[in-house]
Image (cartoon, grey):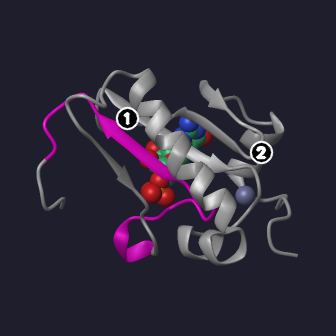
């Protein structure tokens, strides 16, 4: 069923505490943790605790949780003090766009200049 934990999913394992992560925020529906391979001084991933393979399926299946992810992304930016200088929220979708983990996640990137458009 949509939203149920997947035994072979890395981010479900982080939600369950089975894989360690540096968690910076947690809410009833979301977890935010530092990316293991940071691309900016601030690089935090915000994920729903429920398993959805990408952002669009999350928004279709649980729109209130998709809103929670975006709200938490903004809170991470404020906590990290990059909200003033500007930050980027990225939702890579599909392997051609760089998605490598098939559990919806928002990258929060900031703390350096961010070119537009991204590569
Ligand atoms: P994607 O490429 O799917 O948009 O983003 C996946 C992100 O997850 C990558 O930026 C990658 O560095 C990060 N990542 C992969 N494995 C782990 C892990 O075990 N722990 C943490 N904290 N981040 C991970
Ligand atoms: Zn998952």
The magenta stretch spans which residues?
95-114
Badge 2 element: helix
Considering depth in this image, is 70 or 41 the residue closer to the camera? 70
Query: The N terminus lies in which quarter of the figure?
Result: bottom right
Residue sitting at x 71%, y 68%: 62
| Residue matched to label 1 | 38
- Disc 1 + disc 2, Cβ < 8 Å: no
Image quadrant in which you'd find residue 87: top left
Crowding around mark 1 (Cα neighbors within 10 Å: few <14, some 14 to 19, many 20+) is few
Whether residue 74 is visible: yes
Q: Residues within 10 Å of mark 2 (few under 14, many from 20)?
A: some
Q: Quadrant of ligand 2?
A: bottom right
Residue 8 coordinates in the image, percent (x, y):
78, 59
Q: Nearer the viewer, residue 60 or 64?
A: 64
Q: CA distance from mark 1 to mark 2?
A: 20 Å
Q: Is mark 2 within 8 Å of ligand 2?
A: yes
Mark 2, residue position: 13
Towards the viewer: 32 or 119: 32
Residue 83 inside the magenta-drawn segment: no
Among the two numbered marks 1 and 2 on one chain, the one whose residue lies closer to the N terminus: 2
Prevailing SS of the magenta stretch: loop
Queried whether the magenta region covers residue 111, the answer comes back as: yes
Q: Position of residue 76 (x, y in %)?
A: 47, 32
């Amino acid at each position: 069923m949509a939203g149920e934990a997947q035994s072979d999913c890395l981010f479900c394992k982080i939600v369950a505490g089975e894989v360690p992560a540096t968690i910076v925020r947690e809410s009833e529906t979301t977890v935010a943790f530092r990316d293991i391979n940071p691309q900016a001084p601030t690089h935090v991933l915000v994920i729903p605790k429920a398993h959805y393979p990408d952002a669009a399926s999350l928004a279709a299946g649980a729109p209130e949780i998709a809103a929670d992810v975006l709200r938490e992304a903004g809170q991470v930016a404020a906590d990290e003090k990059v909200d003033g200088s500007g930050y980027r929220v990225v939702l890579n979708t599909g392997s051609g766009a760089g998605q490598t983990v098939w559990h919806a996640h928002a990258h929060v990137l900031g703390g350096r200049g961010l070119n537009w458009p991204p590569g």
